[in-house]
Image: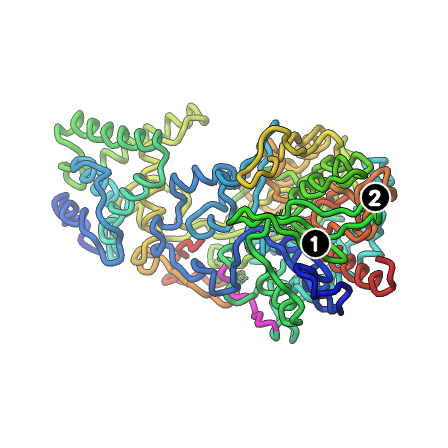
Amino acid sequence: MYFNNINEPNTYDAIVVGSGISGGWAAKELCEKGMKTLVLERGRDFQHVTDYKTAYLAPWEFPHLKRSTRQMRREQSVQMRTGYTVSEAHGYLFVKDTEHPYIEHKRFDWMRGYQKGGRSITWGKQSYRLSPMDFEANAKEGIGTPWPVSYDDIAPWYSYAERFAGISGSKEGLPQLPDGDFQPPMALNAVELEAKKAIETKWKGRKLIIGRAAHLTEPTEEQINLGRGQCQYRNLCMRGCPFGAYFSSQAATLPAAARTGNMTLRPHSIVHSIILDDDKGRAKGVRVIDENTGQAIEFFARVIFLCASALPSTAILMRSTSKRNPNGMDESGALGHYLMDHHLGVGANGVFEGHLDKTTFGRRPNGIYIPRYRNLHEPGTGGYLRGFGYQGGASRQGWSRNIEGFGVEFKKQFTSFGAWEMGMGGFGECLPYYENKVELSKTRTDRWGLPLLEFDAEFKDNEKKMRIDMMNDAAEMLEAAGMKDISTHNSEPVIGLGIHEMGTARMGTSSKNSVLNKWNQVWGTPNVFCTDGAFMTSAGCQNPSLTYMAFTARAANYAVEELKKGNL
Amino acid sequence: MTGVGLLLPEAVLARAGEILEGAPPKRRFFNGTEKRIVAAFAECVVPRTDTPGAADVGAPGWIEILVDDCYDYDDQMDFREGLMEMDQAARDRFGKGFSRLTYGQQVQLLTDLERSDIARAKADPHAPPSFIRSFKDLVKLVYVSTERGANEAFSYVAIPGRYDGAAPVQPTTKVEAPVW
Ligand SMILES: Cc1cc2nc3c(=O)[nH]c(=O)nc-3n(C[C@H](O)[C@H](O)[C@H](O)COP(=O)(O)OP(=O)(O)OC[C@H]3O[C@@H](n4cnc5c(N)ncnc54)[C@H](O)[C@@H]3O)c2cc1C
Ligand code: SF4
């Protein structure tokens, strides 16, 4: 299908900006519908399997036994704030902060991976649907702006995304966490099963389930044809999966796009802005800066998908100015505002005294999930709106536990099993606040001349109040499960650290209250779609990427239909 | 069981600087005294038994590399100071530097120092971890991360292929070495 005269240089049917979770999906859908698609990715090329150079290394094969060096920490001073991503094994999949600085009026932890595949390589794969309750909450409570999309609108696209991506999980029939089209669930272990029984007996309405995760437990024919295999329980996923067993752009969407013959992927291509045609109220194409040469290049297409992840896409919209859009592509004043994330770093741990004759074999790249149970029926009980879910798990203590003493006695304990322990940490919903914002710096630019992003955002009272319950409930549930030595934690929550940044170009019901309409189209420029986390009107407390997949697929299919009808 | 009792400090020293196959090149971050204390201390944490000890797995060399390349400068200073304080404690109590004590004296000294650290930590829960605690943690981490430590004293399974959430623990079942 050629909507454009492809004999024109640099001209395609569609342009997709970014090749992470959202961009991979846009590329797949557009290419499969016959669109000649150019994927512009700012990072380097990064091949499935052959570029996973650390995937099979044992700890002793790393120069520093996998630890981060002082130099890595200097170059990745922000990326290392997670405490687990910057290591010799996979630190290189996160940006160097020395090359990609930004400005923090308040602390904001911005975790980025700039390579083909984006953060689809390093993500945690937890995959949950938002529920009808989540899509209705803003309207019901008068918070932010109402979602223009209902659960029923998106449900078929969730199914579509789940079937292709491959999500393992159990069906539970919970209204607050709808079931999906799942592959067989992974197993709970002996102590998690104890906790499940105890918690579900004591509290009607609370459930402990296995995490729903984008790992293949029973690959479909379609997945096998893409070269994907079953999960091998190594839990070294962040280095890239040589079996293609978890969902990544590399393993799933990009090969599906490539096999159509319709995809061109250009790495080292930093999209600067969208080229606007004010008279027609349309976009013509995009301006790109070549990462290596600094050269400016223009590419043209009928339709443009922004999938650079929430904040870079927001920045592109801000940099896309014209006479009609002097402040970037937004008439509502919402662009850059309502920045959200999930707040975490709160929960409890305990020790379980039984089951000493059992341990786990294999490393399950997944844990338990306790779906939200607070405020399901009455908003605002407990003094806060919305709620939280828990992730965690039980395992047998081993070498790393604290043991007193020295010599042979110490070594004997060091090399033998400790008790079982179990922990759970909350993921809480954050409300959309106008004051939580990101802007383009007026004074400082990066090495490509792009204005730095300035962050001014924080978690507020609603989140902080919720955290008291998040901490105490966790301890109560562990206690009910028979745990001893329970300890609780509730660190000062830092926005960004949930790595679910979203909401800065939200969807809404009109161009007065939002940047995007219900099809993820920019109000006023209908051939530009934005389908990454920027569109989120509220956050839910579920890990969001599955929602980006579903909305991206829905928007891409809509775009092609509209093009065919001559409406775009 | 094994010849731990026979393991004289000299024997530890002899192996301390040994470069095992696959182990990284020698460093000059520590001076001779520091190297000897590190080697002796590491062996007190994980002695050779029927499985390798700290020196067997090249732990002293790895410790030097990690402290040299991975520690922040402040932590390097604290580390050196910690070694010197231990050496001084050995002199105060036994009239000899730490590495020249018998293995039994070393273990006794460390056990006593650790006990008083623990008492101090109880009194002030916010105090930073003592040198002895952080050194032990480092030895543990290094030991389980080495090929022999992971495979001989622990079990290292590169590709488990399945998950069993209630696998039986038999007397021969080894604790898993970390891969992550
Ligand atoms: C350690 C970790 C664990 C996580 N765990 C989970 C989880 O369990 N569940 C979950 O749902 N989510 C999780 N996430 C979040 C998840 O990774 C993101 O939500 C998801 O990757 C977002 O997809 P995206 O396509 O919008 O952005 P990305 O995957 O970040 O991809 C964006 C791409 O755009 C490129 N790009 C950026 N700017 C430009 C530009 N100007 N021009 C061209 N290209 C550009 C980038 O290089 C990148 O390749 C986790 C993230 C991390 C880091
Ligand atoms: S645990 Fe599964 S998904 Fe992760 S790297 Fe191993 S095989 Fe791949």
Image position, residue A563 (x, y; %): 82, 62
Residue B104: image quadrant is top left
Residue B174: image quadrant is bottom left
Q: Residue at x 47, y 50 (%)?
A: A92
Q: Is residue A210 visible?
A: no
SS state under label 1: loop
Q: Amino acid at mark 2?
A: Gly
Residue A105 located within the stretch drawn in magenta = no
Quick check: is the Cβ at mark 1 less than 8 Å away from ligand 1? yes
Crowdedness of circle 2 by 10 Å Cα count: few (<14), some, many (20+)?
many
Q: Nearer the viewer, residue B168 or A300?
A: A300
With A34 as the anchor, is A361 left or right in this view? left
Which mark is in front, 2 or 1? Answer: 2
Q: Range of the magenta residues?
A: A226-235
Location of residue A74 with respect to A65 vertically, above or below: above
Location of residue A44 with respect to B129 vertically, above or below: below
Image quarter in which the N terminus of chain A is found:
bottom right
Identify the subunit bearing mark 2.
A
Location of residue A366 with respect to A338 vertically, above or below: below
Query: Magenta: predominant secondary structure element?
Result: loop
SS state under label 2: loop
Q: Residue at x 59, y 52 (%)?
A: A269
Q: Which residue is mark 2?
A: A508
CA separation in Å, label 2 and label 1: 22 Å
Q: Which residue is mark 1?
A: A128
Mark linked to residue A296: none
Image position, residue A285 (x, y; %): 72, 52
Going from the N terminus, do you reach mark 2 or mark 1 first? Answer: 1
Image quarter in which the C terminus of chain A is found:
bottom right
Identify the subunit bearing mark 1.
A
Q: Is residue A450 visible?
A: yes
